[in-house]
Image (spheres, grey):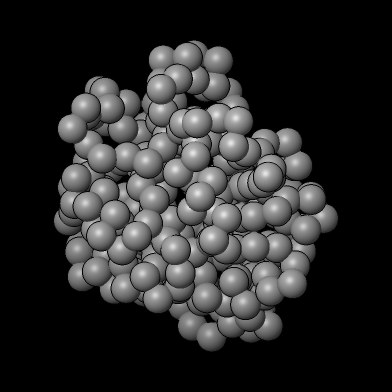
Amino acid sequence: MKLYYDLHIHSALSPCGDDDMTPNNIVNMAYIKGLDIIAISDHNSCLNARAVMEAGKGVVKVVPGMEVTTAEEVHTLCLFPDIDSAEDMGEYVRAKMTGIKNQPEIFGRQLVMNSQDEIIGEEENLLVNALDMDIYEVSAETKKRGGLFIPAHIDKSSYSVTANLGFLPPDLYVDGLEITSRGLETFGKQYADFGIITDSDAHYLENISERERFIDEENKNTQKILGFLCKF
Ligand SMILES: [Zn+2]
Ligand SMILES: [Zn+2]
């Protein structure tokens, strides 16, 4: 069993996500690229996850997720086993927002869409801001809902656990770590005992991963992630 994946993709709901990142464009591009499974992971919200999952039916498997910004301004990838758990977390996260409103002309529009790519709303709260929720709470709330908690792009010099906390806290529960393709050489060695994934973090259609990276049962560190993905 080999799953070609890209588990970090933003839709037009993320202010920094291109307006062309519609549910059908995303799943069709993933199909063209030959991916088996993708995750939709907008900043602090999963309001487009249901539409992308619906659009993905018969095209590509879609995991509902979110890239949560913790109080420490660490980006974390939270993936959920089903849309109800994801939306439940979405509600939880919404209550932890600081109330700062989006300014679309500065940050970009935050489009909520249906599975036909029609705009059905716009999110008012600015989604990229840090939540009133520390990294331990995000980890625990994700785990509680049967999800996977994976600190995002840990090799980046900003918005990452290593940059913002200085290290990966040994007492922090994680299911894996995301390292960008650039950081694999160095960080991959340093964190070799963890299940490591590498995603596109695509904000534009053309940046969605090629059929390059896969998870299979050969690597025991990613077995939990593989088991989770196999249920989709
Ligand atoms: Zn990020
Ligand atoms: Zn991202």
- Does 9 appear above or below 82? above
- Does 232 appear above or below 210? below
- Quarter of the image for residue 224 reads top left
Residue at the (46%, 78%) spot, across then down: 122
- Quarter of the image for residue 59 reads bottom right
Residue at the (62%, 38%) spot, across then down: 216
Where does residue 28 sit, x and y in percent of width and height? 76, 64
Q: Is residue 185 visible?
A: yes
Give the number of callouts. 0
In the drawing, does residue 142 fall left or right of residue 6?
Answer: left
Residue at the (32%, 73%) spot, across then down: 88
Q: In which quadrant will I find the C terminus?
A: bottom right
Where does residue 89 sit, x and y in percent of width and height? 31, 67
Closest to the observer: 90 or 16?
90
In the drawing, does residue 134 fall left or right of residue 56?
Answer: left
In the drawing, does residue 166 fall left or right of residue 194?
Answer: left
- Does 83 appear above or below 190? below
Q: In which quadrant will I find the N terminus?
A: top right
Q: Is residue 101 visible?
A: no
Where does residue 45 sit, x and y in percent of width and height? 39, 65
Residue at the (57%, 77%) spot, across then down: 51
Where does residue 129 sit, x and y in percent of width and height? 30, 54
